[in-house]
Image (cartoon, coloured by chain):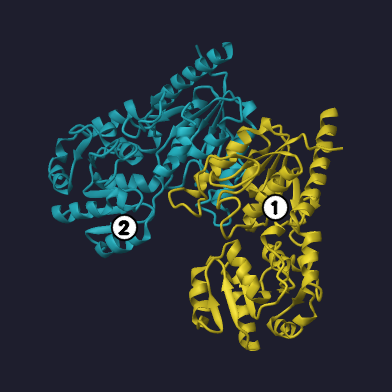
Chain colours: A cyan, B yellow
């Protein structure tokens, strides 16, 4: 049974443009879902910033992402943007929300079912909202990032646009860190691994924790062995992957998904990741990289990179983390929701 | 025509308890409206923190004000609290919101009409929300605090509970400042007026701007001529009014209403206020205090305080700024809304 005559609203965050220029995992995934659904013939409306780029119909009330436009108050942008989608709820058969706990607070005021992909629990303080709306429809982005208090319809792994990250035959020489500059991401551990192995490290990403950058990262930037190149767009990522021998993701807290791990693998770059959270779901140990528990193990793994088949990395992403795989999984989730809703109506 | 069989939801903020322990003008007014409506026989439900004190039915999902409880995330509290009221909208004939722009974003998702008392525009950045919902029902708390972009049903002045602020026959000796310690409130100008007049000043209120307090206020605290006594509750305010010769409100930006001006007048204390915003609506120049344009004029006015009849100050509050006066005015506004809604239904 095809549901592709159904109308779906995809509610993307408005912190950044969809897709984002550099950082912005939630907007990336929401945008990819919209693209994938359109490609399969669904009637899709993307609620996102006005400068967003999409094959879906774009519905926008916020000009630019509030993290890209100081004239916009984030709180105001969120209230205006989220409520706009719910005010148009009757035009849709499903609202697929990527807007965290805030969108839930509107869900009982409309008849349209709301599916929430939970991209992460930012704080225990947001849990009361999920507790109240625990009868909602939820998808987790990894088995690791589930709350025991919620019932989920499925885990659907994030899918990336593989055409953006072409396979690179030849491995580069450098260690690469790509992500938010924040202690959670273990940039300092990547630096330590570089120092212990005597290898060169390139760091890219937005600085999210200024003090951490200033105290723990900047003192090591010598322009030779440790370099920081700032945030990068897709072209910049591909340059980075070309230079990469490996991506180091020595996160210090459980990863929720780790989009960059899949992006690196897509380009053929193996990943050494801390075995915390979702990393073991995204990286197959000894197949597409290595899972480690500390910096020493990461350094040991650096010596074993020749064991990794770069083609294998690419294939794994094609199979598990493509837009197509993700959207197929969401189509199943949508079908389940439509059935459940139909049963409710018949009661 | 009485509407007192109608069911009204009063949506109070959850920054503080309703009524607040010390600071919290919005919660004070929302609480007073609920009390006044109940006294007149209305069926009133107050949406406020669980520790609130009210004669109305209390509906609460947030235990304590987020400014009184660090375990609570303000954003989470607001989303949970506001949506709760709207989820119960069908139980009410009117939602009377004191919750700023946020509540508006739910207003089109329910059939119940929503009246918003605008307690102030905190920033030009919130105006897009009012622009979107400019067809809503609005009340201003002073003629001065109106946006030219909005249509208002009325200005309804804030009403205070006169029983809390008994008239004090005899004037005290001190100059008194009572309010948030913030440059907007001109605490530094009150200090200058005290210095120029050689009079003693008592300062009371919460410190909202730490740097301002540290740099501009603290250096003057000598324990003799300038004293800071911290935040005060109602009993503390009455002690302050007993010691007061005058209340100094040398605000540097337009006042929106100035609840404390009415409270001081209720106790018989004249007010010297900067002639900015609503001050000339609350204080009658040369009758219940003096309106001034600078510190020099404030100092001159200090020499004319004997001209003010303290009984007159009290009478003015009884007439214009009592709960009864306020609730009468709101009853008229409600009646107008019910009529307008009835006309809409008949169309």
Classify mark 1: helix, strand or loop.
strand
Mark closer to the observer (1, 2):
1
> Residue A110 — which label?
none
Residue B180 visible from this viewpoint: yes
Displayed quadrant of residue B291: bottom right
Circle 1 packing at 10 Å, graded few (<14), some (14-19), many (20+), is: many
* Quadrant of the rendering where the C terminus of chain A is positioned: top right
Q: Position of residue A203 (x, y in %)?
A: 30, 53
Circle 2 packing at 10 Å, graded few (<14), some (14-19), many (20+), is: some
- Look at the numbered discs 1 and 2 and tell me whether their residues touch, using CB distance below 8 Å: no
Query: Viewer-proximal residue, A138 or A84?
Result: A138
Q: Examine the rendered structure and indicate whether residue A74 appears above or below residue A312.
A: below
Q: Which residue is labeled 1 in the image?
A: B118
Query: Viewer-proximal residue, A176 or A2?
Result: A2
- Chain under disc 2: A
Counting the numbered discs, the total is 2
Q: Is residue B247 left or right of residue A267?
A: right
Query: Viewer-proximal residue, B178 or A147?
Result: B178
Q: Which residue is labeled 2 in the image?
A: A228
Q: Is residue A265 left or right of residue A78?
A: left
Q: Examine the rendered structure and indicate whether residue A109 appears above or below residue A79.
A: above
Identity of the residue drawn at 24% across and 46% down: A250
Residue B131 visible from this viewpoint: no
Classify mark 2: helix, strand or loop.
strand
């Amino acid at each position: 049974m095809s549901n592709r005559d159904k109308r779906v609203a995809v509610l993307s965050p408005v912190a950044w443009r969809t897709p984002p220029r550099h950082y912005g995992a939630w907007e990336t995934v929401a945008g990819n879902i919209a693209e994938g659904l359109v490609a399969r013939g669904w009637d899709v409306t993307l609620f996102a910033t006005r400068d967003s780029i999409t094959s879906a119909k774009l519905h926008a009330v916020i000009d630019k992402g509030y993290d890209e436009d100081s004239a916009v108050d984030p709180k105001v942008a969120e209230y205006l943007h989220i409520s706009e989608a719910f005010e148009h709820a009757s035009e849709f058969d499903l609202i697929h929300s990527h807007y965290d706990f805030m969108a839930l607070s509107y869900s009982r005021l409309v008849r349209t079912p709301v599916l929430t992909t939970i991209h992460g629990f930012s704080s225990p303080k947001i849990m009361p909202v999920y507790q109240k709306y625990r009868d909602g429809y939820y998808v987790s982005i990894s088995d690791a990032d589930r709350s025991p208090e919620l019932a989920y319809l499925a885990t659907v792994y994030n899918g990336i646009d593989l055409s953006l990250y072409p396979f690179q035959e030849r491995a580069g020489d450098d260690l690469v860190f790509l992500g938010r500059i924040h202690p959670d991401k273990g940039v300092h551990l990547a630096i330590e691994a570089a120092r212990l192995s005597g290898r060169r490290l390139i760091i890219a990403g937005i600085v999210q924790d200024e003090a951490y950058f200033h105290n723990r990262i900047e003192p090591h930037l010598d322009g030779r062995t440790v370099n920081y190149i700032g945030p990068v767009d897709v072209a910049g990522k591909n340059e980075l992957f070309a230079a990469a021998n490996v991506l180091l993701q020595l996160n210090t807290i459980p990863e929720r998904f780790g989009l960059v791990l899949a992006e690196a693998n897509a380009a053929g770059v193996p990943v050494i990741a801390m075995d915390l959270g979702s990393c073991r779901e995204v990286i197959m140990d000894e197949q597409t990289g290595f899972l480690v528990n500390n910096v020493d193990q990461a350094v040991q793994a650096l010596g074993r990179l020749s064991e990794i088949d770069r083609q294998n990395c690419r294939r794994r992403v094609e199979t598990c983390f493509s837009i197509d795989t993700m959207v197929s999984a969401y189509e199943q989730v949508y079908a389940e929701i439509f059935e459940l809703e139909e049963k409710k109506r018949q009661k």
